Image (cartoon, rainbow, N blue to C red):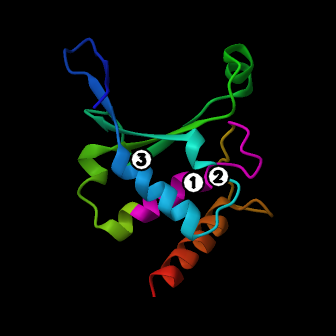
Amino acid sequence: MQKYIKNHKRGRGIVWEVAPDVKKRLSHLVTSLDISWVKPTRVFCLRSFNAKTHAIARIWGLGKIWQGVLQVEAAYIVEVISEKYDKLPEVEKDKVILHEITHIPRNFSGALAPHIRRGPRNFHRKLEVLVAQYFRSLK
């Protein structure tokens, strides 16, 4: 399994490794819930260890300037924080992945949708719709 390491000054570093289990789950959710704007082939999944964050997972987008310079399409990385994510029940893991998917805008541009609370682009309302769809699919 491919690993990436970032050393901190204190001798303890973040380790990232490719997470095929998260990728498989993400692809399944995108397909089964018909989340048509997400291109699973352009979403990469990593699991991190020793990350100094309160988050369970985070998403990284490849912005326009990087796409232009590298001459690649838009892409995203979903990073799950092993110490927190791996302890969750499967349903909660899926909800975390859906939360990160909700950050991907419909134009799949490499940008990230923020946690907007009001108006037509309400992040939490979109997430609630996806989670409700998910629970209906379980029945």
- Compared across the picture, whether 50 is left or right of 35 comes to left
**Is 16 rendered above or below residue 102?**
above
Q: CA distance from mark 2 to mark 3?
A: 18 Å
Of the numbered discs in the image, which one, if any, rests on residue 35?
Answer: none
Q: Are marks 1 and 2 in contact (CB under 8 Å)?
A: yes
What percent of the width, then of the height, locates residue 84? Answer: 28, 50
Magenta includes 74? no
- Compared across the picture, whether 43 is left or right of 84 comes to right
Q: Which residue is mark 3?
A: 57
Type of residue at label 2?
Answer: Val
Label 3, secondary structure: give it.
strand
Which of discs 1 and 2 lies nearer the camera? The answer is: 2
34 or 12: nearer the viewer: 34
Q: Residues within 10 Å of mark 2 (few under 14, many from 20)?
A: many
**Is 134 rendered above or below residue 121?**
below
43 or 41: nearer the viewer: 41
Q: CA distance from mark 1 to mark 2?
A: 8 Å
Q: Residues within 10 Å of mark 3 (few under 14, many from 20)?
A: many
Of the numbered discs in the image, which one, if any, rests on residue 101?
Answer: 1
| First in sequence: mark 1 vs mark 2 | 2
Q: Are marks 1 and 3 in contact (CB under 8 Å)?
A: no
Report the magenta residues as a range. Answer: 94-110
Label 2, secondary structure: give it.
loop
In which quarter of the view is residue 33 placed? bottom right
Of the numbered discs in the image, which one, if any, rests on residue 38?
Answer: 2
Q: Residues within 10 Å of mark 1 (few under 14, many from 20)?
A: many
Which of discs 1 and 3 lies nearer the camera? The answer is: 1
What percent of the width, then of the height, locates residue 21? Answer: 34, 51
Label 1, secondary structure: give it.
helix
132 or 31: nearer the viewer: 31
| First in sequence: mark 1 vs mark 3 | 3
Type of residue at label 3?
Answer: Ala
